[in-house]
Amino acid sequence: MTTPCKTPRHIAVIDVGKTNAKLALVDSATMTELAVVTRPNTVLAGPPYPHFDLDGHWAFFLENLAAFHTQHGVDAISVTTHGASIVLLEQDGALACPMLDYEFLGPDDLADAYDQLRPNFSETGSPRLPGGLNVGAQLHWLFDTDPTLLDRTQHIITYPQYWGYRLTGKLACDVTSLGCHTDLWNPWEGKPSSLAARMGISQKLAPARQSSDILGDLDKTVSQITGLSPDTPVVCGIHDSNASLVPYLDHGSQSISVVSTGTWVVCMTLGGNQAPQLDAKRDTLINVNALGEPVPSARFMGGREYEIIRNGSDAIPTDEDRQQVIRKKIMLLPSVVTESGPFPGQKMQWTVPPDTDGQRIYALSLYLALMTECCLDLTGGGRRTIVEGPFARNSDYLGMLNSLREGHVEAALSQTGTSVGAAMLIEKPAKSGSDFAAEKPRDQHLSRYAQQWFSMVPQG
């Protein structure tokens, strides 16, 4: 694990989630955010297809790196981004094509042809997913759509390393991003899968490095624009859900599950209580952690489901709302987003329609916790469960999850768990894990509610 010589005090973290792009400044002594700025991660409609606004993000990052440095000082930079994303560069480093939005369904037009190419789940731990959620499917569609693209592409890099390239000029991939259902990585052997050779990109794929490796120092032009020292180290970078796992990688044999929440809810288990039940049809997968190790994982699009059912309401459930939901057994059954998660293809339904927005929001929080429990069970479930991200501030969600788990459920209190995890790639505190709040004792009413919910959903 490569680290800079000087201990950095303030670490700027480029943190690009599917919904928002953020820049956070983390104090390495306390592992808390001193400042966070965000902009929407708006998908540009095209042409030639839906793609991300990389230039807009870059201007935003440069402007706020300069502001952070003026206000606090920036000593190092780390990067974390959503997965299922790849960037293709020409010889001169320019984009060979816009960065495809993984939710674009265009690759499904070539699904049959791609299925003949992709390796088995047993080789990659990568389930077959719709649209561009498998990076291999993205590349297959892009190369077929533009017959000149493969020859023009000189370098293929994973998304965190695109920002590292803009910052340092150095090319790399990282193991966590390659291991995020790309179909391009063999997590058991720690090397590219057979797909890279089949697609003719083995020599174009940038070298895989550990997330904590330092790519290099800041590019001189970037240094001049931002005012940061040209000696500022830039870390290789990490897939965002795996960033949430970083603080727990040194907990030895302790059994831990980390629930990373955002647009996606991703459950990852280290040293589970039981063997994982990995099923490619139920959106389980093998993630790869910052050390390059395989991690049983399962997920669903919880943040997206929350926004769909919330439908813009800011209602706060009252005690009466909660009592009515439990008494009337008002339940949301899976799945709100049918294309992913442990119950693919199942369409959502209400057992009893909620009477108020408060009841709807409370039942939604319970649904999200129950879906999380399904995912935790599929990964083998740890004795200690830690919730990171927005759902860590939802007491109703945490209360239900706490009633379901045999061990302790804790909520990370930091504003941006992924940013802290990414900062720890550069500087790990002497003591971690103090920034948590343990949940209250189990509620038997919730336990009975959960039993009935599970009796009505499909069993694997």
Image (spheres, grey):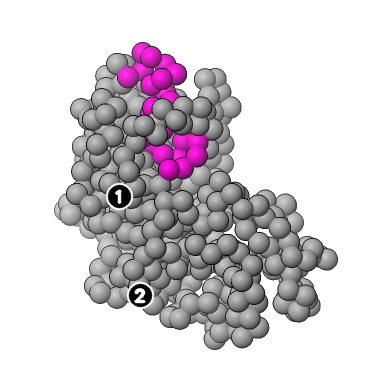
Foreground of the two, 86 or 213: 86
At a point 54% along the width and 60% down the height, the residue shown is: 390
Front position in the image: 86 or 435: 86
User: Residue at coordinates 54% horizontally, 20% vertically from top-left?
Assistant: 47
User: What residue is rendered at 41% in x and 27% in y?
Assistant: 113
Considering the image in quadrants, where does the N terminus appear? bottom left
* Residue 116 x, y percent position in the rendering: 36, 32
| Snapshot quadrant of residue 105 | top right
**Does residue 420 belong to the magenta stretch?**
no
Q: Which circle, 2 or 1, is nearer the viewer?
A: 1
- Dot 1 crowding, Cα within 10 Å, few <14, some 14–19, many 20+: few
User: Which residue in the protein does label 2 denote?
Assistant: 273
Q: Which stretch did the figure color magenta?
A: 128-150
Res. 458 visible in picture:
yes
Q: Position of residue 428 (x, y in %)?
A: 27, 63
Q: Is 101 placed above or below 33 here?
A: above
**Residue at the disc numbered 1:** 122
Under circle 1, the secondary element is helix
